[in-house]
Image (cartoon, rainbow, N blue to C red):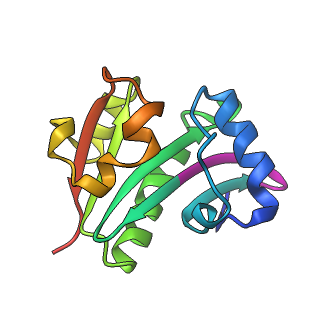
Amino acid sequence: MIYTFATKDNEAEIRRLLAENDLHHEDITLPMLTHFLLGSDGPRLVGVVGLEIKSHSALLRSLAVDSKFRNRGIATNLIRRIEDHAKSLKIETLYLLTVTAEQFFNKHGFQSAHRESAPADIQETSEFQSLCPASAVCMIKQIGN
C-alpha cells in the first residue's frame, strides 16, 4: 500500500470512492485536496481521508476504503497518518461527524461531544451546516499540546 497526498489529478477517483461509500463529496474543492491522504494499491485508489482545516482545528472527513480492501488495517493507517499530518500543521483538535462509524473512531481515541461544542468555524462547514444530518454523532480528539 502506498500513501500519498492528493493532487487535482485524483479528484475524479476520490469522488468515485466517496460516492461508492455513500459519503458526501459535493463540497470538496481542489484546494481542499491538498490535505486529502490517499491509499493506493498499484494504480488503484483504495482509501482516502481528508482534513478541512480551520485555524488550530480541523474537520476530519471523507474516510473511505474500497469494500474489496476492508479489514486490512487501511482505515487505521489512514487515520494515523492524517493525524500525523495534522500535528505537523500545528492542528490541536480534530472534529468529525459520523452516522455509521462511531465505534471505529472511539477505538482511535475520538470521544462523543455535543455538536454545539465545536468552534464556530467548524460549525460553519458544509458538513455541519447541511450535508450531515442532525442525528450524526459529533466526535472530538485532542492531538496537540
Q: Is residue 27 magenta?
A: no
Q: If the image is split into quadrants, where does the C terminus sit?
A: bottom left
- Would residue 93 appear left or right of 98 to someone viewing this image? left
Q: From the viewer's perspective, is residue 110 above or below residue 50?
A: above
Picture coordinates of residue 40 (x, y %)? 72, 54
Nearer to me, 134 or 140: 134
Picture coordinates of residue 65 (x, y %)? 61, 39
Q: Which residue is drawn at 68% across and 64% down?
A: 6
Residue furthest right in the image: 43
- Numbered range of the magenta stretch: 41-49
Q: From the viewer's perspective, is residue 65 above or below residue 80?
A: above
- Would residue 55 appear left or right of 116 to someone viewing this image? right
- Would residue 104 appear left or right of 22 to someone viewing this image? left
Q: Which residue is drawn at 35% across and 37% down?
A: 97
Q: If the image is split into quadrants, where does the N terminus sit?
A: bottom right
Q: Which residue is drawn at 28% across and 70% down?
A: 56
Q: Is residue 42 magenta?
A: yes
Picture coordinates of residue 127 (x, y %)? 43, 40
- Would residue 105 appear left or right of 141 to someone viewing this image? right
Q: From the viewer's perspective, is residue 21 above or below residue 92?
A: above
Q: Can residue 59 be seen in this view?
A: yes
Q: Please state the total of marks drawn on the protein image.
A: 0
Magenta-drawn stretch, dominant element (helix, strand or loop): strand
